[in-house]
Amino acid sequence: MRLPHIGTPRRRSLGSLGSLRGGWALAALVACLAALVGAPSAHAADPPLRDLADAKGKVIGTAVTGSKLTGTYGEIAGAQFNWLTPGNAMKWGSVEPTRGSFDWAEADQIVDFAEAHGQEVRGHTLVWHSQNPNWLANGTWTPAQLSQLMNDHIALEVGRYKGRVAAWDVVNEPFNEDGSYRQTLWYNGLGVDYIAQALTAARAADPAAELYINDYNVEGVNAKSTALYNLVRDLKARGVPIDGVGLQAHLILGQVPSTMQQNIQRFADLGLDVAITELDIRMQLPADSAKLTQQAADYKAVMNACLAVSRCTGATVWGFTDSDSWIPDTFPGQGAATPYDENYQPKPAYRAIHEALGGTTTPPTGACTAAYSVTSQWDTGFTGQVRIACSGAALSSWKADWTFGAGQRITQAWNATCTQSGATVRCSNASYNGTVPDGGSVTFGFNGSWSGSNPVPMVTLG
Ligand code: XIL
């Protein structure tokens, strides 16, 4: 895993957009459990997603949970993504659970993390029908009170992060599927004007922040996206501050709308930016290789639809790992929706995003690969090996890196020098086995400790 970037927080210029704003008890067997080839997808020379996206002036973001931003989760979030969205931390119910008493801890933590890693933040979300505090949702309010509450909330939250949050999902999910307005606290109390009011308040609180309306099932051309289109067209015509639309893109396997690019283009033609804000592609569990292959194709289709339109700023995934996805809780029986599996191993979908962003699409003709296997395992320990084999290529020295997904620790190694720091392991050749000739192989071994599960990591050869 690449170390996080340490960089100066910067205001992203959104490409050429011209925008103003910028496991198991093993019976004693010696079987190879899961030889995982260090495929090109995990080659050390692969740039992280964010470098590819930066080179294109595009966003590759992820929703994050503040409490998880350490260890492997934090390493990947920092190394692979150039934008972060707090998955829940900035919602009204999170920041003001009791009227007048605020909790900014997780939101602050995420913004600090982003700045320490040279990342931009997408604020999510200010005005929504869901995840509001009970005092607000269950209160009885006059229109004047509601308006005041909404405006004060926006002024406070946007003001707090002024200059530090690059874009806000000001209004979230205002429409029903048929394109009518959703009956919410806000719509019922203030009428459709709540949207213009919210945008205006957000602009006043941070004139440099990009202001978005965000919704789901608006990825293709349909009644709902057309209602959104008509709304933002009218808002723009009236001079109401609006910079872009967010297409959440909570998609179902094999169902990327064929009209996605066309839909993005029509919003762009209004002079608005378009962001894919909550991308995930769910499937019926269990996942299998056919589904994961389809999912990769789907991710690529979404990326390509966005990248084909210059005003599409890029994509944010709604959690980068299946261990941090909302899908299994919300859609029982479904999951595996993100680019990394539950053990932080990249899935074919990761590769698809990488390729769409311009990463190498074809494996080199000659290659050296590393295969990790557990050769025996007992209650608390295991023996593993890594076999490095070359075909059409050769090595004069080697390093094999991997990240343990479940707290495993190396206790002893042979035929290599291994060091472990946190979850990250690096093994280098011994003085006598650095050379791996074309058509040859070298194997080294190690003992380790484990508990709970002992998933096989992906090895990167350097
Ligand atoms: C989801 C979060 O990921 C969950 O942790 C939470 O329990 C419910 O909300 N559309 C949105 C997001 O705009 O805020 C939602 O996030 C997913 C759907």
Image (cartoon, rainbow, N blue to C red):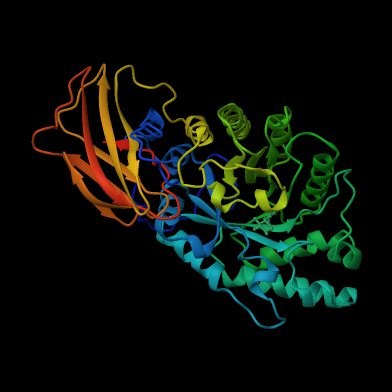
The front one of 288 and 113 is 288
The picture quadrant for ligand 1 comes to: bottom right
| In this picture, residue 149 sits left or right of residue 205 | right
Determine whether 69 is above or below 105 in the image.
Answer: above
| In this picture, residue 252 sits left or right of residue 27 | right
**Image point (29%, 50%), residue name:** 448
The front one of 187 and 284 is 284
Farthest front residue in view: 27
Determine whether 39 is above or below 51 in the image.
Answer: above
Number of numbered discs on residues: 0
Q: Position of residue 410 (x, y in %)?
A: 27, 51
| In this picture, residue 426 sits left or right of residue 210 | left
Determine whether 265 is above or below 59 in the image.
Answer: above
Q: Position of residue 328 (x, y in %)?
A: 66, 49
The front one of 186 and 74 is 74
Farthest left residue in view: 431
Image quadrant in which the C terminus is located: top left
Is residue 49 visible from the viewing direction of this image?
yes
Q: Position of residue 394 (x, y in %)?
A: 20, 22
The front one of 408 and 154 is 408
**Image point (76%, 41%), residue name:** 218
Is residue 110 visible from the viewing direction of this image?
no
